[in-house]
Amino acid sequence: MNINIIKEKNTTILNISGSVDATQIKEFTGIIEEICSSADRDIEMNLEKVEYMDSTGISLLLKIHKCCKQSGNSFSISGVSEKIESLLSLCSLNETLLK
């Protein structure tokens, strides 16, 4: 998994590529916690180049969503492949996470 972070005005854009799974999540969690601690930023996550996501990745998406909601910021996901959208739909999270 690779993460490219772009900060624009009040938004942090995370361009993710590769697999978002249990083997890669530790590094990613640390980055997310750091970004969430700066409560004045919206977060946009671009998943266009994500090839695979497991339940650990979904859990992380929910954690980011909750963090943003609690701090009054927005969280959006863009570039979702059919495969990832189907996974979120199976978990009944497409309406929560894909707006």
Image (cartoon, rainbow, N blue to C red):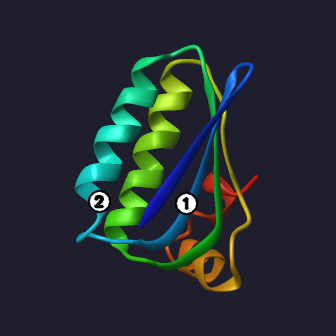
Query: Which residue lies at the image location 70% right of the left edge and 57% below the top edge?
Result: 98
Q: Is residue 19 found left or right of 41 in the rendered image?
A: left
Q: Secondary structure at mark 2?
A: helix
- Looking at the picture, does residue 38 appear above or below residue 67? above
Count of numbered circles on the image: 2
Q: Which mark is residue 79?
A: none
Q: Toward which corner of the image does residue 10 lie, by quadrant?
A: top right
The crowding category of the residue bearing disc 1, from other C-alpha atoms within 10 Å (few below 14, some 14 to 19, many at least 20), is: many
Amino acid type at circle 2 is Ile
Packing grade of label 2 (10 A; few <14, some 14-19, many >=20) is some
Please tell me in which quadrant of the rendered image residue 55 appears. bottom left
- Is there a contact, CB below 8 Å, between mark 1 and mark 2? no
Q: Is residue 13 above or below residue 93?
A: above
- Give how far apart the Cα atoms at labels 1 and 2 are: 12 Å
Q: Residue at x 31, y 46 (%)?
A: 29
Q: Pick the residue in front: 91 or 54.
A: 54
Q: Residue 69, position in %: x, y?
A: 55, 29
Which kind of residue does numbered mark 1 sit on?
Ile
Circle 1 residue: 16
Nearest the eye: 47 or 73: 47
The image position of residue 63, as x and y in percent, is 40, 44
Q: Is residue 43 above or below residue 60?
A: above
The residue carrying mark 2 is: 25
Which residue sits at x=62%, y=72%?
Answer: 49
Labels 1 and 2: the sequence-earlier one: 1
Helix, strand or loop at label 1? It is strand
- Residue 74 in percent (x, y) is at 66, 31
Q: Quadrant of residue 94?
A: bottom right
Q: Position of residue 33 (x, y in %)?
A: 34, 33
Image quarter where the N terminus lies is bottom left
